[in-house]
Image: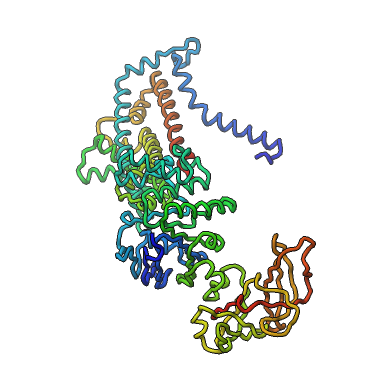
């Protein structure tokens, strides 16, 4: 970049700043306004307050939806991490069938969510499974499986094959090799995959709307509220979720970018 | 530890990957307590030999015997051998002592016993201070020593080393060669060392097994391989032999002449019955070392010929001259190594010189 002449550098910087401001400033509007009251459609900048947060704590509808979202998210994480890791382990090093499996795993992730959602809906109806949180969890797991599978598989592929050979060579059984060598080397990829899976499940809307029963998750709830207009406590909710998401992203990056310990350089 | 008893025997061992054969009918005996080096260019099958012995790959045919017992089908984790891998294969999530103690801990040895033996092994490889480091915090040479300590802590009958010095720079490689050799003497364990570097092989091995294209070409002491190669490949692979093609003449006691483009060359055939048995007129090579060639004063007689100095290369203590000899139709390039002199070499490029070598310094190789 240093090689560019000065005017073009300035031009590039200006464009970058403009894009960043245009794209990301809307994110900060709800955060800022969550600390002020709104009267007659205008933000009252004169008196900072935490009243929106207090209102949020009393909004049982929203809190129930949040709890549902968290339950679905955690179940999805457990299911997708276990099955994604098992699939990655099973297909690692196996040529035959792997590309087909990958295609199938990636399909729900790449297809428009409305198609995935409809397909699942029809499937659940055909096998006579009542729509409930269970169907939501299944839907989310199908959706995020690709991410976990891919993350774990990439770590497996970057792991030197001789590590496993060395373990056997030193007298370990297959079981010992799995628990003491393979799993510890995968764990950070699994945690990273879990965080991504949780984040995806957290805001998944389309599939959820189609396959959920009576309970709604947070995004679905917000979606429904749009028709009536938002109450100010939504600003507080958005601010909280935003902070939580940033935290998750930082954590995911930490686990997914290999630390020096995880990569042996020669 | 008796160097005359065989520890491990490979009998008619073959290996193919799919339809591609990599080892053809290998027979090899490893003696108890020796330092055996398997030497060969890449693709010669040397690493496959090591992987078959270690149990990392199944045999296609033949058998491997340990103390006379067939272990061909013994699983890798039951074999009393340990391997030092080319990339060391240290477990990145374990400390040095965790790595070294792994072989004991998977066998459920008591914690206190493990700690004692790990300390001992680290002491042996001079890494006592680094017990709590992670592999990523060590230098190449240190990792190499951790891998060695990890392999020898289980007191294996045989330690397999797969080009363990390949990733180190020259100076460190020399140090590690001496170090490995001294450790081997100290713990009196059999070492099977795979390398493509003939200098490394000569420096460390009790015996060397030269492999090429999935065959064992020669097995012997470094001295035997250096001075009495049994085939053209070994003669060319080991150092910078001069090879001159010709046809064998009648046996004269412990010597035999060969008719070449450089005239009649007489070479020693002592202790080599296959050279005595070869028929007259058989195609062969006269092989002699650059340091065996001397400047001569006459051009007549056996083992004497003249040549033109094409090039001179100063190599420190010695100077290597490339010499064009023989007729124009059968030109032959030879190397001559003479001690360097402080006032510059006595030789000049373009000069024509007479050369000779003593019959006992020449050697025959069947083509």
Q: Is residue A211 left or right of residue A250?
A: left
Q: Residue at image x 63%, y 32%? A: A14
Report which quarter residue A37 is drawn in: top left
Task: Residue A114: tell me if it is visible.
Answer: no
Q: Residue at image x 19%, y 43%? A: A128
Q: Nearer the viewer, residue B187 or A88?
A: B187
Q: Is residue B253 left or right of residue A236?
A: right
Report which quarter residue A234 is drawn in: top left
Residue B222, percent across and down? 52, 66
Residue A213, percent across and down? 25, 34
Q: Residue at image x 44%, y 12%? A: A49
Number of marks present in the image shown: 0
Residue B360, percent across and down? 60, 77
Q: Nearer the viewer, residue B306 or A58?
A: B306
Q: Is residue A242 left or right of residue A9?
A: left
Which quarter of the image is occupied by the C terminus of chain B? bottom right
Task: Residue B340: tell me if it is visible.
Answer: yes
Report which quarter residue B110 is drawn in: top left
Residue extending farthest top: A47
Query: In the picture shown, does residue A106 fall above or below B226?
Result: above
Which quarter of the image is occupied by the N terminus of chain B? bottom left
Q: Nearer the viewer, residue B260 or A204?
A: B260
Q: Residue at image x 44%, y 53%? A: B84
Residue B215, percent across and down? 45, 72
């Amino acid at each position: 970049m240093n090689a560019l002449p000065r005017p073009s550098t300035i031009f590039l910087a200006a464009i970058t700043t403009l894009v960043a401001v245009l794209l990301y400033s809307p994110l900060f509007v709800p955060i800022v306004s969550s600390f002020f009251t709104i009267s007659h459609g205008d933000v009252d900048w004169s008196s900072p307050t935490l009243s929106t947060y207090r209102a949020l704590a009393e909004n049982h509808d929203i809190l129930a939806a949040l709890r549902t979202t968290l339950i679905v998210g955690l179940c999805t994480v457990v299911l997708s991490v276990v099955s994604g890791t098992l699939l990655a382990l099973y297909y690692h090093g196996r040529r035959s069938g792997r590309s087909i499996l990958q295609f199938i795993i990636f399909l729900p992730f790449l297809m428009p969510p409305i198609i995935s959602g409809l397909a699942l809906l029809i499937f659940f109806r055909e096998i006579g499974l009542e729509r409930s949180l269970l169907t939501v969890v299944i839907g989310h797991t199908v959706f995020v499986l690709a991410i976990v599978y891919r993350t774990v598989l990439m770590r497996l592929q970057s792991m030197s094959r001789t590590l496993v050979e060395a373990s056997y060579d030193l007298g370990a059984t297959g079981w010992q090799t799995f628990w003491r060598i393979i799993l510890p080397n995968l764990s950070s990829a699994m945690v990273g995959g879990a965080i991504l899976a949780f984040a995806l499940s957290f805001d998944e809307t389309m599939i959820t709307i189609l396959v959920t029963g009576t309970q709604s998750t947070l995004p679905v709830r917000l979606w429904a509220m749009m028709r009536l207009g938002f109450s100010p406590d939504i600003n507080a909710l958005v601010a909280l979720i935003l902070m939580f998401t940033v935290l998750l992203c930082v954590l995911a990056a930490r686990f997914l970018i290999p630390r020096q310990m995880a990569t042996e350089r020669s | 530890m008796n160097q005359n008893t065989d520890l491990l025997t490979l009998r008619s061992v073959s290996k193919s990957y799919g339809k591609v054969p990599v080892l053809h009918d290998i027979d090899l005996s490893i003696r108890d307590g020796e330092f055996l080096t398997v030497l060969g260019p890449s693709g010669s099958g040397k690493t496959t030999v090591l992987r078959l012995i270690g149990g990392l790959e199944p045999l296609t045919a033949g058998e491997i015997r340990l103390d006379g017992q067939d272990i061909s089908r013994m699983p890798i984790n039951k074999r009393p051998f340990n391997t030092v891998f080319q990339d060391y294969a240290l477990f990145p999530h374990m400390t040095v002592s965790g790595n070294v103690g792994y072989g004991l801990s998977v066998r459920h040895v008591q914690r206190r016993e493990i700690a004692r033996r790990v300390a001992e092994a680290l002491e042996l490889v001079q890494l006592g201070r680094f017990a709590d480091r992670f592999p990523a915090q060590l230098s190449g040479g240190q990792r190499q020593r951790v891998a060695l300590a990890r392999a020898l802590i289980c007191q294996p009958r045989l330690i397999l080393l797969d080009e363990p010095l390949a990733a180190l720079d020259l100076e460190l490689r020399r140090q590690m060669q001496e170090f490995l050799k001294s450790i081997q003497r100290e713990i009196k364990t059999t070492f099977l060392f795979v390398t493509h570097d003939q200098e490394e092989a000569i420096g460390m091995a009790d015996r060397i097994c030269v492999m090429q294209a999935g065959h064992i070409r020669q097995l012997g002491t470094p001295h035997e391989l250096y001075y009495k190669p049994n085939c053209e490949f070994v003669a060319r692979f080991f150092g910078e032999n001069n090879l001159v093609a010709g046809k064998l003449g009648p046996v004269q006691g412990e010597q035999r002449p060969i008719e070449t483009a450089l005239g009649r060359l007489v070479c020693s055939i002592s202790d080599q019955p296959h050279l005595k048995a070869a028929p007259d007129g058989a195609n062969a090579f006269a092989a002699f070392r650059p340091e065996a060639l001397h400047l001569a004063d006459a051009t007549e007689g056996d083992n004497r010929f003249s040549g033109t100095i094409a090039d001179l290369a100063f190599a420190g203590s010695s100077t290597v001259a490339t010499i064009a000899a023989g007729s124009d139709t059968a030109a032959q390039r030879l190397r001559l190594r003479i001690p360097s002199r402080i006032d510059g070499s006595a030789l000049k490029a373009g000069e024509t010189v007479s050369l000779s070598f003593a019959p006992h310094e020449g050697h025959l190789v069947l083509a």
